[in-house]
Image (spheres, rainbow, N blue to C red):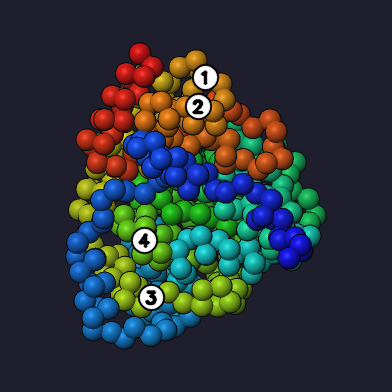
């Protein structure tokens, strides 16, 4: 058969994550490239999921999500952010945050609509938007602080712009947007009547006693924002693939009508377990953050000992290094080199830019630290031996 495939996907290279993970396996390297924990989350959540599968039912859950999980998501919004959310009309459960993003872009964009992305960005955004017929308007965050400039955002918005996508805490950068930066986005969204899709899957992984601030909390933003959360990231259960979206009824309904034609629903027993997880006490969240912050500091110290300049990390699983500090200037080549020769895998930050962004910086790489301490120590030791 000679007919071409959809070039939005077929013309793109394979995702950087399976690419580097495969190379890590082939080289017997420690994989600090793909961002998932190497230990499962709370046993009590897993036990509830297992028993719920045994007890049943194991049939379709409601398309909008089980009532108990939607109520738990609404309660979570109130508990952490003092947001009043109607679980009946303002919450939707999805099959992971990635499906929530796809449903949002398919549900909101018409061919020719524009979407603003802040680069670098999580790699799913661009192809999902383009596959929905949207056009990209790209705004570069300025390294090394990865700051957002109001003038650059304003210059990207046209009469065809319908939405902005933001990610905070940010993958791959580990950056948490300041209130000042959120105000820049909110002001632009209000003035141009835009939707804002907020990827907030790392909302509970903010370090140094800081707190996550949802854009939805700013004045005049609740009616134009959806925020996407992830049980996989909050409870270190990435294989559960349970996401949830909060937003005004109009936007949730539009997203749901796309969601019903993508995954339709998500496993009921897993939704039951996640709902129970959201009722865990503050001690769980404090322990979760403290443990991940300890791992951040452990890997940061090891990378510095190996000779790297390590950029600040305010949240998420990820540390960014400037590879010029070890005499390298091509991030893709660097990541291949250390995987093959130092036996530690990372991912290049340039992979989080659009292919047409030829001036994307090539001197940064991302390491994930959501691994056991002994793994982080061994990875640091290998890098130190290799570079020093």
Quadrant housing the C terminus: top left
Q: Earlier in the sequence, mark 3 or mark 2?
A: 3
Q: Residue furthest front?
A: 1
Q: Earlier in the sequence, mark 4 or mark 2?
A: 4
Q: Is residue 11 above or below residue 23?
A: below
Nearest to viewer (mark 1 / mark 3): 1
Q: Which residue is mark 2?
A: 334
Drawn side of residue 282 relative to residue 97, left or right: left
User: Alpha-carbon distance for marks 3 and 4?
Assistant: 12 Å
Marks 3 and 2: CB-CB under 8 Å? no
Secondary structure type for disc 4: helix
User: Alpha-carbon distance for marks 3 and 2?
Assistant: 40 Å
User: Alpha-carbon distance for marks 2 and 1?
Assistant: 7 Å
Drawn side of residue 298 relative to residue 86, left or right: left
User: Alpha-carbon distance for marks 1 and 3?
Assistant: 46 Å
Other-residue count near label 2 (Cα within 10 Å), few / some / many at <14 / 14–19 / ≥20: many
Q: Which residue is mark 4?
A: 239
Secondary structure type for disc 2: helix
Q: Nearer the viewer, residue 6 or 257?
A: 6
Secondary structure type for disc 3: loop
Secondary structure type for disc 1: loop
Marks 2 and 1: CB-CB under 8 Å? yes
Marks 4 and 1: CB-CB under 8 Å? no
Residue 136 locus on image (x, y percent): 71, 50
């Amino acid at each position: 058969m000679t007919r071409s495939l959809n070039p939005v996907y077929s013309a793109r290279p394979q995702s950087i994550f399976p690419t580097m993970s495969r190379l890590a396996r082939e080289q017997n390297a420690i994989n600090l490239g793909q961002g998932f924990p190497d230990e499962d989350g709370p046993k009590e959540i897993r036990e509830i999921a297992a028993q719920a599968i045994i007890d049943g039912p194991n049939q379709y859950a409601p398309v909008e999500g089980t009532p108990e999980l939607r109520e738990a998501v609404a309660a979570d919004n109130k508990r952490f952010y003092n947001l009043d959310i109607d679980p009946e009309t303002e919450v939707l459960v999805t099959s992971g945050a990635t499906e929530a993003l796809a449903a949002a872009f398919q549900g909101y964009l018409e061919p020719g609509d524009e979407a603003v992305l802040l680069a670098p960005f999580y790699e799913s955004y661009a192809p999902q938007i383009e596959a929905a017929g949207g056009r990209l308007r790209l705004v570069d965050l300025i390294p090394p602080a990865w700051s957002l400039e109001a003038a650059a955002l304003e210059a990207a918005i046209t009469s065809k712009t319908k939405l902005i996508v933001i990610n905070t805490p940010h993958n791959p950068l580990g950056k948490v947007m300041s209130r000042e930066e959120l105000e820049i986005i909110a002001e632009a969204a209000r003035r141009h009547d835009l939707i804002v899709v907020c990827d907030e899957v790392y909302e509970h992984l903010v370090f140094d006693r800081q707190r996550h601030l949802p854009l939805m909390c700013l004045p005049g933003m609740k009616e134009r924002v959806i925020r996407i959360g992830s049980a996989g990231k909050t409870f270190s259960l990435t294989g559960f693939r349970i996401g949830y979206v909060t937003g005004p009824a109009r936007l949730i309904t539009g997203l749901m009508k796309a969601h019903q034609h993508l995954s339709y629903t998500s496993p009921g027993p897993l939704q039951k377990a996640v709902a129970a997880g959201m009722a865990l006490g503050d001690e769980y969240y404090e322990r979760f953050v403290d443990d991940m912050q300890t791992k951040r500091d452990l890997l940061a110290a090891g990378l510095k000992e190996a000779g790297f300049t390590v950029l600040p990390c305010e949240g998420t699983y990820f540390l960014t290094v400037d590879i010029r500090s070890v005499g390298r200037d091509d991030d893709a080549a660097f990541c291949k080199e250390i995987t093959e020769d130092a036996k530690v895998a990372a991912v290049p930050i340039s992979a989080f830019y659009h292919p047409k962004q030829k001036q994307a910086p090539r001197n940064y790489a991302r390491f994930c630290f959501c691994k056991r301490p002994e793994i982080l120590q061994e990875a640091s030791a290998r890098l130190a031996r290799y570079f020093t």
